[in-house]
Image (cartoon, rainbow, N blue to C red):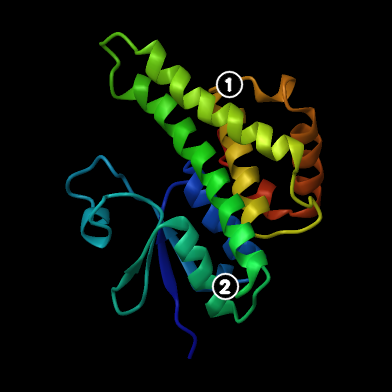
């Protein structure tokens, strides 16, 4: 009997979206239930499932947990019995992992820009801190602009980059579309290739 899983996440989490695209691409939708999580709620069981209180977090039938998004995707690839999203060995695996972490870093910096406002609503915002994070975003995007992944291939790199760009479209931490035309074209082509990108879009974005 196949094991089923629970994914703790929200529709607007870019890292959660990464996992949801992977779930769709791997054909595992019927084995995973998405249950909302609130990282700011002290009573949410997310803090017991992941001591860091961060999502996404995958819960197995025996109650054990797997986090973060990259490790969840590797685990789900094993569950699906494929290497479609990430090569299992060799130099290409480490190139893909490095590029996937670059996309994650863009998302991390993008989230920190949002948090500067969300968690300091009544305090002056730090221009230096905001520019530090936006610099990371711009440098990461410039690297992908120079060498974008194949838009006709769904893997850990393209999934991560698409979610990073989707999050920037939603929260508008920078005006990336006017500066990185190759990535604008790339995202259009990738979203046409991979229907899970649109299927995982939050309804209010």
- Above or below, 42 relative to 46: above
Q: Nearer the viewer, residue 157 or 173?
A: 157
Q: Distance of mark 1 from mark 2, alpha carbons? A: 33 Å
The residue wearing badge 1 is: 174
**Residue at point 62% right, 66% down?**
93
Q: Quadrant of residue 140?
A: top right
Residue 128 appears at what percent x and percent y?
40, 14
The 10 Å Cα crowd at callout 2, few under 14, some 14 to 19, many 20 or more, is many
Left or right of residue 171: residue 161: right
- Above or below, 137 relative to 84: above
**Residue at point 49% right, 86% down?**
2
Residue 53 appears at what percent x and percent y?
27, 50
The answer to whether the residues at label 1 and label 2 have Cβ atoms under 8 Å apart is: no
The 10 Å Cα crowd at callout 1, few under 14, some 14 to 19, many 20 or more, is some
Q: Nearer the viewer, residue 144 or 163?
A: 144
User: Which of pointers 1 and 2 lies earlier in the amino acid sequence?
Assistant: 2
Left or right of residue 198: residue 49: left
Q: Which mark is residue 77?
A: 2
């Amino acid at each position: 009997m196949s094991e089923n899983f629970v994914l703790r996440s929200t529709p607007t989490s870019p890292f959660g979206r990464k996992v949801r695209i992977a779930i769709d691409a791997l054909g595992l939708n019927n084995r995973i239930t998405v249950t909302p999580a609130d990282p700011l709620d002290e009573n949410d069981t997310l803090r017991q499932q992941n001591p860091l209180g961060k999502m996404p977090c995958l819960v197995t039938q025996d109650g054990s947990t797997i986090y973060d998004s990259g490790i969840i995707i590797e685990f789900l690839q094993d569950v699906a019995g494929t290497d479609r999203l990430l090569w299992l060995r060799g130099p290409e695996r480490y190139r893909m992992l490095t590029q996937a972490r670059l996309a994650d870093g863009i998302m991390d910096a993008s989230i920190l820009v949002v948090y500067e406002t969300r968690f300091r609503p009544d305090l002056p915002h730090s221009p230096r801190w905001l520019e530090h994070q936006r610099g990371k975003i711009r440098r990461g995007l410039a690297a992908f602009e120079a060498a974008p992944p194949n838009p006709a291939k769904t893997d850990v790199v393209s999934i991560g980059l698409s979610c990073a760009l989707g999050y920037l479209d939603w929260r508008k931490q920078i005006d990336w579309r006017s500066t990185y035309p190759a990535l604008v074209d790339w995202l259009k082509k990738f979203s046409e290739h991979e229907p899970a990108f649109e299927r995982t879009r939050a309804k209010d974005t």
